[in-house]
Amino acid sequence: MTQQTVAPMTSRQRVLAALRLEPTDRTPVCNPTSVATVELMDLVDAPFPEANRNPELMAKLAATSYTELGFDTIMPVFSIIQESSALGCSVQWEQKDNWPTVRMNQPIWSGPEDIRIPADFFSHPDVTCVTDAISILRKEFGDEVAIIGKTMGPWSLAYHCFGVEKFLLMSLDDPDKTKLCLDKIKDLTVEYGIAQIEAGADAVTLPDHATGDLVSGEYYDRYLQDLHTEFAERIPGHIILHICGRTVDRMGSISKTGMSAFHFDSKNEPQESMDIVENRIALVGNINNPQTLFSKGPEDVRTEVFDNLEAGVQMVGPECAIPLQTSIENLKEIPRAVQSWHADRAL
Ligand SMILES: [Zn+2]
């Protein structure tokens, strides 16, 4: 997709073009999930857990992906628990060096009859924190850089509210009941997505953790393909679906949903993934987190970036939310490698 004839673009133009599968001046570097690190928190004095709950700090920490790391996107929703907190789940907010998590041993729902969206959901501080942070960032950066939000899919929200095991058992025992649950949750995903687009986001990441290690591709077709197609129709902005793990068995179905991009894991080879999606959806990824970004060096990061670029992956970035102790040097290597790859090809 990349052509040397394309005029220089701003980061935002570059990302939007890639999301539309249009030519770009160079491959954009994107983080559809989180690139927050302890080092970056210290640098701008915006630490966890406050940066997950205070819109100014959230915006400040998120902006570092553009201002410090040189990425083409800013993504202020570091965690996956903002909605669950507002739904009433018990959240362990942790400290600077740890992710906030939902206490899964304290589920709030046990069947579809329990599903209820609290009347004050959209005014809950953990929900408005995200839309406020997006507004702050849009005001500060204007049209310079792409801003990405995040709205959790119903499958992921069900894990938090029913407990992972309980929900997976339900999906095995009672498909109708499972579908009813997803159906009762789905409007929340749509409405929060719309709220973030209205606040100024160019795209929303939609994590829906029907992950490779927990469920099969057939599950994706049965439970999620239609829902995800509906999301693409109802949310008036770009959607980047995020599912971890090995997902080549569902990428064909994902590519038919009408969503703009799929954020894919390093358990899938860039080229085999590109061959499956056949340009029906953009791919973003897939630099390995636990080994490469966390424990190896810039040379190894560069090799993986090049693998993605050679395969024609439209947007390059970490495969998932990066470990909080990842070094800034490794993260900066991603845009550096992208730029040098394109410079070499221009010669
Ligand atoms: Zn993930």
Image: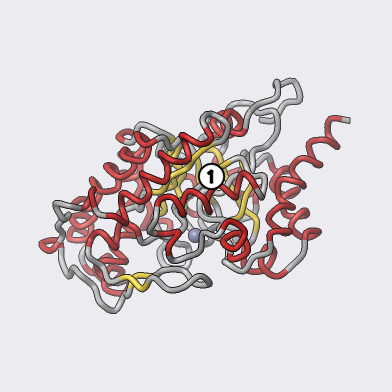
Residue at 62% across, 59% down: 43
Colour scheme shown: secondary structure
Q: What is the three-letter code of the residue carrying label 1?
A: Ile
Q: Above or below — where is 228 with respect to 155?
A: above
In this orientation, which residue lies closer to the viewer: 165 or 15? 15
Pointer 1: what residue?
74
Q: Above or below — where is 278 with respect to 108?
A: above
Q: Name the spot of residue 300 as percent of width and height, x first.
A: 77, 60
Q: Is 284 on the left-hand or right-hand side of 210?
A: right
Q: Above or below — where is 62 with respect to 340?
A: below
Mark 1 vs ligand 1: CB under 8 Å? no
Q: Name the spot of residue 94 as percent of width and height, x first.
A: 42, 73
Residue at 48% across, 63% down: 212
All told, the count of numbered labels is: 1
Number of other residues with Cα within 10 Å of mark 1, as a class: few under 14, some 14 to 19, many 20 or more:
many
In this orientation, which residue lies closer to the viewer: 30 or 185? 30
